Amino acid sequence: MTTTTHDNHSAFLLSLPNIYSQSPISCCVFSRTMVSGAIALAFLPLVLTFIIRYRYYFVLFYRAVLVRMWYDCTTGLSREERAFQYVLTHAIPGDPESILETFDLWCSKVEFISNIGPKKGKIMDRMLSEHCPLTVLELGSHCGYSTVRIARALPLGARLYSVEMDAINAAIAEKIIRLAGFDDDTVELIVSPSDEVIPRLRADYGLERLDFVFMDHWKKCYRPDLQALEGSGLLGKGSVVLADNVLFPGAPNFLRHVRKSGLYEWKIHRATLEYSKGIRDGMAELVYQGIK
């Protein structure tokens, strides 16, 4: 009985894999697998930290890029056209507040669009109320959200010139503006690149001074367009320039020019990115002082 048990035990041991009897190649593969696993475990905390730290940016990428691509493919409409259809079917015509609230609901719950949004919009509302501008220039109409927001806050007799270079977006902005109840006497939409419009404002539109300028177009255009406005002579003492998204995505060249020029009293209104959480952004408020 003892011999049989011993033989069975020996046979069992011999059946087990013996890494020491394997070839050098097998041992090398096993060692590399162990090292790779150890490295992966070592980097896991870093990966998790990165994901947690930048989670809001991942959410933004999902909402602004992936969701947009999906709806582009499934609807056959552009994002701006989808926004207009939603506003058209859910907002009250002739009511600017209803237009803005419906836009905000769509942008926060359905798809992301980089409007100024309600939080930063209230800062602009307050500035418009304080300065009561009669002649306003908007660079970047996009879908018309900020155009409606500005127009509803203007005093009687004021006029807003809104510039949009994209003809398709301009057509949608036109519909939104008219749906909100503003006619050509209050809002004039100019479909052309900003660097072509600014030099023609005096000759083609009879402007002598701009009281308020809102920038929300391509961030790389902020500095050259501001310099063009300075050279045009349309900025007078006390003229206000409000530039959105100067921290995210950012307009460092614009801010550098503002700091070095000495032409402005300025400050940054810090906030979060519109319709997002955890992404820091801000608007630059400039008050033109002229050459001292």
Image: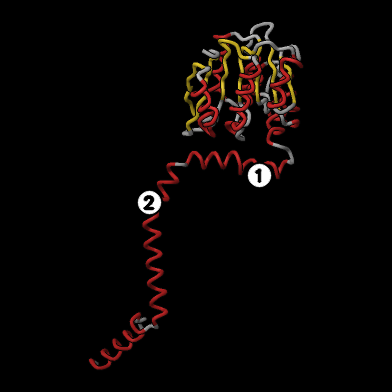
Residue 53 versus residue 136: which sits nearer the camera?
A: 136
How far is disc 2 from disc 1 in space, using C-alphas?
A: 32 Å
Task: Tell me the SS state at disc 1.
Answer: helix
Q: Position of residue 236 (x, y in %)?
A: 60, 11
- Farthest residue toward the top? 156
Q: Residue 78: which disc?
A: none
Q: Position of residue 41 (x, y in %)?
A: 38, 58
Task: Tell me the SS state at disc 2.
Answer: helix
144, above or below 52, in the image: above
Residue 206 lies left or right of residue 263; in this view the side is right
Kind of residue indicated by mark 1: Trp
Residue 164 versus residue 79: which sits nearer the camera?
A: 164
- Farthest residue toward the front? 292
Q: Earlier in the sequence, mark 2 or mark 1?
A: 2
Residue 285 lies left or right of residue 28; in this view the side is right
Kind of residue indicated by mark 2: Pro
Residue 122 versus residue 284: which sits nearer the camera?
A: 284
Residue bearing the label numbered 2: 45
Identity of the residue drawn at 51% across and 42% down: 58
> Looking at the rendering, which quadrant does residue 8 occupy?
bottom left
Residue bearing the label numbered 1: 70
